[in-house]
């Protein structure tokens, strides 16, 4: 299907293609994740984060060069009617995550507005728990639609901010918006009544994992009004290592040996490092969010019968 996709547009370093998906909803059976369904409006992501775990997705389309993930972007053709039919088959209260593999607000969204069309479709349903993950300051563009969605569904936006160090962010996330722009987007969402949190993902050993660095990020997130803060430790799939390790050799050569030793045969860090980081994040979070996050109020039009409501 990818080979047959028509090219929509091209610019200096990126080509855009149209992809006709079989469905927009994908089932997630990982019990460790807090959602059962995922939606990714795009395949590939122009932000080009050096650590990105989702590069493997292009391998399903027989695109083996990991750099193609950020240079060949596939916009999924969207039609509301079949999408609403997919949603109608789901039980009330199902959790749906938007942007689990590729950013739903990457630069392609400015052109093709697939994410906005999906959100507009959700204004015609009710009864789901929706989470949007992004590292883009474009998301406030859709505040008008998000407000309507929030009348019918539980909605939250998780803004990924890896560091408040702009220079470091530019190196590891070369095409993503600056950290301050992302935090400004969080403030706009909060001021508009949209729930939003900040998530540090990934925590990069010896790069952004110190107490001071994580505390600075938590402080900035709190100042922006974020309703929560969390973090995940770096993991490197084989496709990610092909990009991340050469990046380290060029920019952080003193770290190459340590990373190779720890990730040469495994994708996930072993030992007590992950737990130490999670404990550090819990301690920092408690300093800024010293009371439990209140439960989200029930949406105004939340349905109370067993059937999905269609408007």
Image (tube, helix red, strand yellow):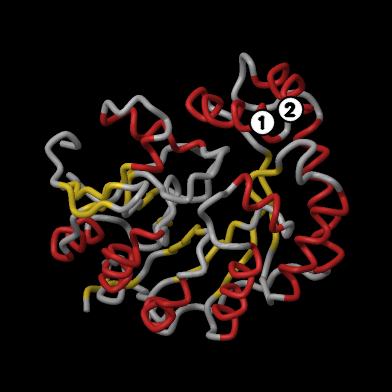
Label 1's element?
A: helix
Rendering coords of residue 150 (x, y %): 43, 77
Q: Is residue 303 left or right of residue 260?
A: left
- Residue 167 lies, in percent from the top left, at 70, 54
SS for tag 2?
helix
Residue at position x 19%, y 50% from top? 18
| Horizontal arrangement in the rendering, residue 137 relative to residue 113 (left or right) | right
Quote the CA–CA distance across marks 1 and 2.
6 Å
Point out the residue furthest to the top here: 265
Which quadrant is home to the C terminus? bottom left
Report x, y in % for residue 189: 54, 78
Between 89 and 135, the one lying in front of the other is 135
Q: Quadrant of residue 199?
A: bottom right
Residue shown at 37% from the left, 46% from the top: 13
State the quadrant of the N terminus.
top left
Residue density around tag 2, few if under 14, some if 14–19, many if 20 or more, within 10 Å: few
Q: Which residue in the protein does label 2 denote?
A: 253
Residue 222 left/right relative to 240 = right
Give whichever of discs 1 and 2 has the lower sequence position.
Answer: 1
Instruction: Say above or below: 140 vs 133.
Output: below
Tell me if residue 200 comes above or below residue 22 in the rendering: below
Residue 224 lies left or right of residue 241; in this view the side is right
Quadrant of residue 128 within the rendered picture? bottom left
Foreground residue among 188 and 131:
188
Give coordinates of residue 165: x percent, y percent: 74, 57
Say if mark 1 contacts mark 2, CB within 8 Å: yes
Marker disc for residue 308: none
Quick one: label 1, few (<14), some, or many (20+) residues within 10 Å? some
State the residue at coordinates (81%, 61%): 216
Q: Which residue is mark 1?
A: 248
Identified at 17% across, 59% down, the residue is 85
């Amino acid at each position: 299907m990818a080979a047959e996709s028509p090219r929509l547009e091209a610019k200096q370093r990126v080509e855009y293609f149209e992809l006709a998906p079989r469905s927009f909803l994908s089932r997630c059976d990982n019990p460790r994740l807090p959602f059962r369904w995922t939606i990714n409006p795009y395949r590939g992501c122009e932000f080009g984060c050096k650590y990105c775990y989702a590069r493997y997705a292009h391998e399903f389309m027989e695109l083996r060069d990991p750099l193609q993930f950020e240079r060949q972007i596939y916009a999924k053709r969207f039609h509301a009617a079949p999408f609403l039919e997919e949603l109608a088959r789901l039980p009330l209260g199902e959790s749906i995550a938007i942007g689990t593999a590729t950013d739903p607000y990457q630069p392609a969204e400015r052109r093709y507005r697939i994410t906005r069309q999906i959100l507009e479709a959700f204004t015609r349903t009710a009864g789901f728990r929706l989470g949007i993950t992004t590292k883009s300051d474009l998301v406030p563009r859709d505040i008008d639609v998000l407000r309507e969605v929030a009348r019918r569904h539980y909605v939250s936006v998780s803004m990924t901010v890896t560091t408040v160090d702009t220079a470091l962010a530019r190196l590891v996330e070369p095409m993503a918006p600056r950290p301050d722009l992302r935090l400004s987007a969080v403030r706009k969402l909060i001021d508009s009544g949209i729930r939003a949190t900040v998530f540090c993902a990934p925590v990069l050993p010896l790069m952004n994992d110190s107490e001071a660095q994580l505390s600075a990020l938590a402080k900035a997130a709190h100042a922006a009004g974020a309703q929560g803060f969390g973090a995940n430790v770096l993991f490197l799939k084989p496709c990610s290592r092909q990009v991340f390790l050469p990046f380290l050799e060029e920019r952080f050569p003193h770290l190459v040996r340590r990373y190779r030793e720890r990730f040469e045969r495994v994708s996930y860090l072993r030992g007590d490092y992950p737990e130490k980081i999670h404990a550090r994040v819990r301690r920092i979070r408690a300093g800024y969010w010293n009371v439990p996050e209140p439960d989200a109020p029930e949406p105004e039009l939340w349905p109370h019968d067993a059937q999905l409501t269609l408007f």
